[in-house]
Image: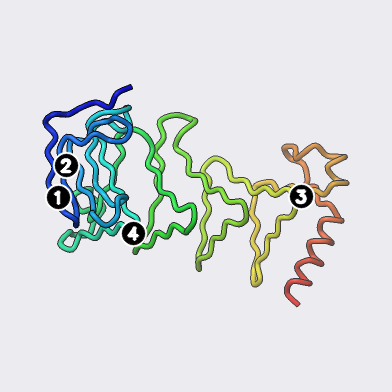
């Protein structure tokens, strides 16, 4: 396939950089505008005109150094869109932030993660790690309006170094031996407390506090 021609292409530049209108890319696509450094070919801003849906009418910013954005000096603080110092919005499609060889740090006076789904399969926030998820604060509140589960394939430790309060309309404790005899709590039944579990838990707490 021959390389397309754009007879209206205009270029201005010198050894320090260039500006081109109607640039033809290596993939035979058209850029309406591109500005490029003369010292580093991978330092440019590109306004795309043709290509697949993700490229057509898109903008590409490329640099081998830091990409620094700082704004909002005169913006009032508040929860409204017009009070945002920097606003990113993906009208359709996902918003990806990646640092495969580094860390992503978000710092602010307050941080909110909000998921507004429209059916039973959306509206979720997922934290996934192959090692640890650490949560540390003076107060940690977990409130599930329908259900709250804490599950581990190995060990679950619940510790209150000063006071441990456990409340429930009906509480059922069971170890492996107890579950063989009881499939679960029944209305009006007494809690099933496995002696092995209680003794191990008591010893574990005593060892921890010594």
Proximity of marks 4 and 2: CB atoms separated by less than 8 Å: no
Q: Compute the Cα span from label 2 to label 3.
A: 73 Å
Query: In the rendered image, which residue does mark 2 sit on?
Result: 20
Q: Is residue 80 above or below residue 164?
A: above
Q: Is residue 7 left or right of residue 188?
A: left
Where is the N terminus found, in terms of image quarters?
top left
Nearest the viewer among 71 and 60 is: 60
Nearest the viewer among 81 and 162 is 81
Crowd class of label 1 (few under 14; some 14 to 19; many from 20; radius 10 Å): few
Circle 4 sits on which residue? 65
Residue located at (31% from left, 49% from top): 62
Q: Nearer the viewer, mark 1 or mark 2?
A: 1
Q: Position of residue 207 (x, y in %)?
A: 78, 72
Q: Which residue is mark 1?
A: 13
Q: Which residue does the image show at 17% across and 29% down from the upper left? A: 6
- Of badges 3 and 1, the one in the foreground is 1
């Amino acid at each position: 396939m021959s390389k397309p021609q754009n007879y209206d292409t205009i270029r201005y530049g010198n050894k320090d950089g260039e500006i081109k209108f109607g640039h033809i890319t290596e993939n035979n696509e058209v850029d309406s505008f591109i500005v490029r450094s003369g010292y580093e070919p991978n330092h440019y801003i590109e306004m795309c005109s043709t290509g697949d849906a993700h490229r057509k009418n898109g903008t590409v910013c490329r640099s081998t150094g830091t990409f620094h954005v700082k704004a909002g000096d005169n913006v009032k603080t508040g929860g409204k869109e017009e009070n945002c110092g920097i606003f990113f919005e993906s009208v359709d499609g996902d918003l990806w932030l990646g640092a495969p060889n580094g860390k992503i740090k978000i710092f602010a006076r307050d941080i909110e993660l909000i998921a507004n789904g429209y059916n039973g399969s959306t509206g979720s926030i997922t934290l996934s790690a192959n090692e640890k998820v650490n949560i540390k604060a003076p107060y940690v509140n977990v409130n599930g309006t329908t259900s709250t589960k804490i599950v581990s394939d190995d060990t679950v430790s619940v510790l209150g170094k000063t006071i441990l309060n456990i409340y429930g309309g009906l509480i059922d404790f069971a170890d492996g031996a107890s579950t063989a005899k009881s499939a679960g709590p029944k209305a009006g039944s007494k809690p099933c407390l496995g002696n092995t579990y209680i003794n191990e838990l008591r010893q574990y707490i005593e060892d921890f506090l010594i």
